Amino acid sequence: MTRGPLFHEQTARQRIAALVDPGSFDELLAPPERITSPYLAQLGIPVSFDDGVVIGRAKIGGRKIYLAAQVGQFVGGAVGEIHGAKLTGLFKAAARDRIPCVIIIESGGVRLHEGSAGEIAIAETMRAIFECRALKVPTLAVICSDIGAYGGMGILSTCCDFRVMTEHGRLGISGPIVIEKWMGKKAYDSSNRALVWKTSGGKTKYLLGDADALVHDDAGEIRDAIARLLGKSSPMSLKAVKARQAELAKRLKRFGQTQDADAVWKGMGVRDIEAASLASGPEFAAMAKRGK
């Protein structure tokens, strides 16, 4: 029996088709609109007619959502002015219509070719996310590929109410190559896949509370996780922000000088590192219990 592609192997449009109710996706600003980056064209770099992100309306389990999926195959899913404007508009529409918004992130951050325009675009999208959260409109980030959610998109994902991750997902402020460049190969070897996986992968992020669900690399299970979170929102208050800040300060004090990822796992209550490494995402979640 031939299996279909795993979720992390699929394209942005394949992922959308696999997640939403059949026939429910209505793409906004689709490729025929020909809305492309002016900066790439000026530099003589090929453009994409969706500028690396697919946005639209859909349903999951009959419930209306707004949905975006970044295209990792185009400039690594990096965000430029048009790409970011599409995301900003989508979250603003979600706030206006009181409809949950889901974003499938696959991006290294800002498109260097567009500099400040990309940075501003991400900042505007974050503001739109907070508009949703102030109205208790659920916002969800799905992180499921090796490209991951880094740079501004890593920060943006943490602005959402919830994050769903798979083992293949990566989440961080700086990508492995950037860390190696500034700290040196001895401090962080970006070619060491096990090291990268242990420090920014889905299991570690779930363990530390940065991911709210850790699921199989399967569209059905990711869809189920999204469906469970669509009716929820996390508190958007000064008290909640202070509580989260206290958690992060505690984490920094506990693990700030730790250079061995296994020590973080042990410190968070993972007793059998080898078994946990081989376990599936849901099995790991059951074993770890977030250090309790």
Image (tube, grey):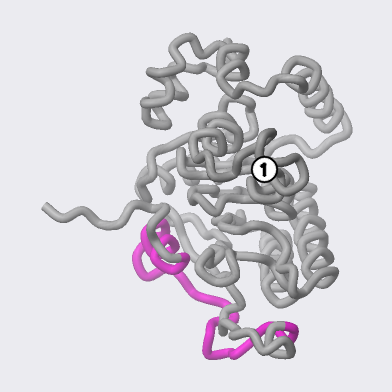
Quadrant location of residue 189?
Answer: top right
- Where does label 1 land, which residue? 172
Percent coordinates x, y for residue 27 in the rendering: 52, 76
Amino acid type of the residue that numbered disc 1 sits on in the rendered structure: Gly
Identified at 74% across, 68% down, the residue is: 112
Asked if residue 185 shows in the view, the reply is yes
**Is the C terminus in the top left, top right, bottom left or bottom right quadrant?**
top right
- Horizontally, residue 125 falls left or right of residue 175, namely right
Identified at 69% across, 62% down, the residue is: 91
Asked if residue 136 shows in the view, the reply is no
Q: Is residue 51 above or below residue 91?
A: below
Percent coordinates x, y for residue 61 in the rendering: 41, 52
Quadrant location of residue 52?
Answer: bottom right
Please, what secondary structure does the residue beneath circle 1 have? Answer: loop
Identified at 54% across, 49% down, the residue is: 142
Stretch of the chain drawn in magenta: 12-39
Percent coordinates x, y for residue 252 in the rendering: 78, 22
Identified at 37% across, 26% down, the residue is: 278
Q: Is residue 13 above or below residue 126?
A: below
- Horizontally, residue 36 falls left or right of residue 229, namely right
- Is 20 covered by the magenta stretch? yes
Quadrant location of residue 107?
Answer: bottom right
Instruction: Name the one closer to the observer, 254 or 17.
Output: 254
- Horizontally, residue 131 falls left or right of residue 170, namely right
Instruction: Name the one closer to the observer, 42 or 15.
Output: 42
